[in-house]
């Protein structure tokens, strides 16, 4: 059954490719702007990821997608330091790595992509070697043979791959925090809950470094040194955290690249929602296409600022943090804090409107070294 499905999918892709080539050839005949040979060659390069799958380990997949049928055997046995499976994270990174490889092959050819993949394989093998001395020699010798133009492309390939991998890791952390909140509520057992009220899923009640966890330990501990609710309330409403915004001149991540990484994370979040709700194949395809567009756009984006930032440009970078993060996150956290205070101590202990748990400062434009 699986083989038949893959055969049907392959036939559909081949038909779509032929249709695309015919359409482009017809367009070329009408416009005269590009030869049929060049268009057909571009189509073969565009279809490269169906055949070789360099710059990733997706050799078993028919097409890069966020919606794989199952994780690989390697993913099933790998986990992080907390024993949590990393299959979702590794699947997302592999998918985006494949899409990045497609973009490289499309713009620069298959040869340079094979060199990127060869260097990646050597780096992976070096990490598995027990002997530290000399384990980078093969990579050094390989890089020495590259031309200056190839060095630029290879360096950009790994820089962008690490960038999208970091975006996937940030998303994975958010995914696990959401799962932990859900588990706190669903797995709560009143018989083992002690004196503390049931978790409401706003802030992490079972994490000692979370506000809800600290409140629970303070108010409902059995060590005899429990403070009163008034004392906890006074402490929460009187303390202030100062957040200092800065945009150092040596900051290499451009605003446009940060925005694209943020959009990648949003696509991954939407993909999680589609997986959990078993969304339609149309919606899955839309998200796969959106991710492909973002990765292609990232590859065509210069990752380094070529001019020295002015105080005004530093301020613009700082406002990006406010626009994309603080503007939504801070009010959301205050609402969660208010709900947690009322749940833990009673409705009379809600967060006052006059409370200012956070304040902001800035030295953007002041550090001009």
Image (tube, rainbow, N blue to C red):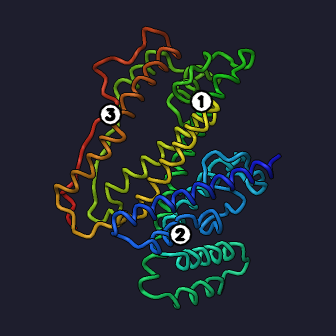
Label 1: which secondary element:
helix
- Mark 2 highlights which residue? 45
Label 2: which secondary element:
helix
State how far apart marks 2 and 1 are (Cα).
45 Å
> Nearer the viewer's eye, disc 2 or disc 1?
2
Which percent across, then down, holds residue 253? 36, 60
Label 3: which secondary element:
strand
Query: Residue at position x 65%, y 52% from top?
Result: 12
Q: Earlier in the sequence, mark 2 or mark 1?
A: 2
Instruction: Determine whether label 3 and label 1 are within 8 Å by CB.
Output: no
Which percent across, then down, holds residue 154? 49, 76
Which percent across, then down, holds residue 74? 76, 57
Q: Nearer the viewer, residue 2 or 14?
A: 14
Left or right of residue 208, residue 87 in this image: right
Q: Nearer the viewer, residue 166 or 344?
A: 166
Determine whether 117 is above or below 80 in the image: below
Left or right of residue 297, residue 144 in this image: right
- Mark 1 highlights which residue? 181
Which percent across, then down, holds residue 337? 44, 24
Determine whether 111 is above or below 161 in the image: below
Residue 158 appears in the rendering: no
> Nearer the viewer's eye, disc 3 or disc 1?
1
- Mark 3 highlights which residue? 358
Q: Indicate which disc residue 311 carries.
A: none
Dividing the image into 4 quarters, which one contains the C terminus?
Answer: bottom left
Query: Residue at position x 70%, y 24% from top?
Result: 187
> Nearer the viewer's eye, disc 3 or disc 2?
2
């Amino acid at each position: 059954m699986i083989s038949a499905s893959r055969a049907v999918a392959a036939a559909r892709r081949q038909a779509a490719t032929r249709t695309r080539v015919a359409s482009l050839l017809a367009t070329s005949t009408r416009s005269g702007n590009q030869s049929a040979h060049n268009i057909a060659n571009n189509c073969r390069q565009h279809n490269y990821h169906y055949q070789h799958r360099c710059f990733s380990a997706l050799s078993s997949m028919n097409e890069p997608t966020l919606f794989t049928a199952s994780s690989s055997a390697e993913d099933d046995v790998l986990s992080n330091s907390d024993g949590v499976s990393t299959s979702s994270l590794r699947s997302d990174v592999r998918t985006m790595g494949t899409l990045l490889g497609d973009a490289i092959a499309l713009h620069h050819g298959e040869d340079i992509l094979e060199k990127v993949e060869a260097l990646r394989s050597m780096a992976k093998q070096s990490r598995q070697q027990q002997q530290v001395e000399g384990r980078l020699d093969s990579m050094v010798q390989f890089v020495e043979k590259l031309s200056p133009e190839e060095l630029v492309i290879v360096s950009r390939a790994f820089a962008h791959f690490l960038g999208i991998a970091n975006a996937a890791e940030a998303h994975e952390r958010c995914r696990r925090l959401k799962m932990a909140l859900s588990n706190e509520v669903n797995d709560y057992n009143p018989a083992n809950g002690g004196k503390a009220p049931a978790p409401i899923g706003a802030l992490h009640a079972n994490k000692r470094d979370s506000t809800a966890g600290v409140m629970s330990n303070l108010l409902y501990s059995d060590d005899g040194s429990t403070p009163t609710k008034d004392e906890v309330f006074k402490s929460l409403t009187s303390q202030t955290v100062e957040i200092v915004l800065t945009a150092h001149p040596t900051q290499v991540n451009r605003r446009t690249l940060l925005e694209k990484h943020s959009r990648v994370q949003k696509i991954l979040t939407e993909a999680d929602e589609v997986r959990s709700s078993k969304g339609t194949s149309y919606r899955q395809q839309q998200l796969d296409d959106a991710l492909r567009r973002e990765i292609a756009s990232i590859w065509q984006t210069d990752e380094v600022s070529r001019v020295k930032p002015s105080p005004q440009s530093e301020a613009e970078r700082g406002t990006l943090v406010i626009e994309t993060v603080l503007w939504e996150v801070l009010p959301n956290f205050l609402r969660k804090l208010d709900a947690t205070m009322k749940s833990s101590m009673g409705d009379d202990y809600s967060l006052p409107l006059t409370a200012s748990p956070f304040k902001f400062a800035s030295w953007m434009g002041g550090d001009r070294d």
